[in-house]
Image: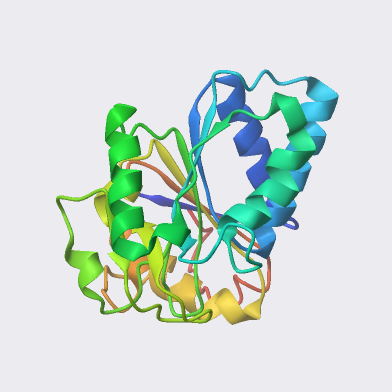
Amino acid sequence: MTVSLEIVEDPARGCAALMVGAAIAQGDIVLTGGSTPRAAYRYFVEAVDSVGVDLRQTTFWVGDERCVDPDDDRSNYKMIKESLLDPLGDRAPRFERMKGELGPEAGAADYERALREAGGPAFDLLLLGIGSDGHCASLFPGQATLNERERLVVGVPQAGLEPFVPRISLTLPALASAGRIVFLATGTSKADAVSRAFGPDAEPDPQTPSSLLVPEAASISVLIDDDAASQLHFTGEPQ
């Protein structure tokens, strides 16, 4: 498949527009953590306020979680709650959170059960960041979780980057099942990982987990700013 690389001034705003489109279509949206997604969620709330999007048939999921209490500052859920769910108030759609407080294995089993009971995965839009090491969700370079092909959700006993707490993560097959995957990256710290995962010479490599989605996913869009694109070298226009 062809990866769509889009170098834009504000990846968060572009992501919010895609979220609005998926919500209007009553789709299921998988959220992610990070500072750029946080900004995207705020833009999304502004759009819902101005356009009046009906979210009653939309479901929010999450791609990974840290095994901490839901009110811990390291929790993806806490960030999503503060930047997205609370501002939406009673307009917020159903949100299926990963219960990090259960621990990696019990939390993974609980989320897998929720996905299968909902008939999933049936994700329309899935948001991902990319780590400086090339990881996505909580699938880290060289770890055995990259080889999982039967389960939808796995426990990750040891994180590859800070914060060094156990995690819960969707697996590569679960991520790849989404109708559209959108990676978000800003800043020079992500430039090398973006190049290794999505550059013109990139190949699927377990040392760059994000690259493993390229041959498996139906559609991947990569929204990046100039700094994150600084190590991409094309002979023509990026596709």
Instruction: Choose top left, top right, bottom left or bottom right for residue 158.
Output: bottom left
In the image shown, does 39 or 182 lie closer to the viewer? 39
Instruction: Choose top left, top right, bottom left or bottom right for residue 108.
Output: bottom left
Q: Residue furthest left?
A: 150
Which residue is found at the position 26% from the left and 79% from the top?
A: 142
Q: Is residue 7 visible?
A: no
Which residue is found at the position 64% from the left and 50% from the top?
A: 80
Which residue is found at the position 68% from the left and 68% from the top?
A: 226
Task: Please indicate whether residue 66 sits to the left or right of residue 1 in the image.
Answer: right
Instruction: Choose top left, top right, bottom left or bottom right for residue 78.
Output: bottom right
Relative to 183, is 163 above or below? below
State how the image is colored: rainbow
Give the image location of residue 89, x and y in percent: 76, 32
Task: Please indicate whether residue 96 sits to the left or right of residue 141 in the image.
Answer: right
Which residue is found at the position 16% from the left and 54% from the top?
A: 149
In the image shown, does 72 or 232 lie closer to the viewer? 72
Q: Is residue 30 visible?
A: yes
Give the image location of residue 196, x and y in percent: 41, 75
Task: Please indicate whether residue 53 sits to the left or right of residue 99 in the image.
Answer: right
Give the image location of residue 205, x and y in percent: 27, 73
Q: How many marks?
A: 0
Give the image location of residue 235, x and y in percent: 48, 68
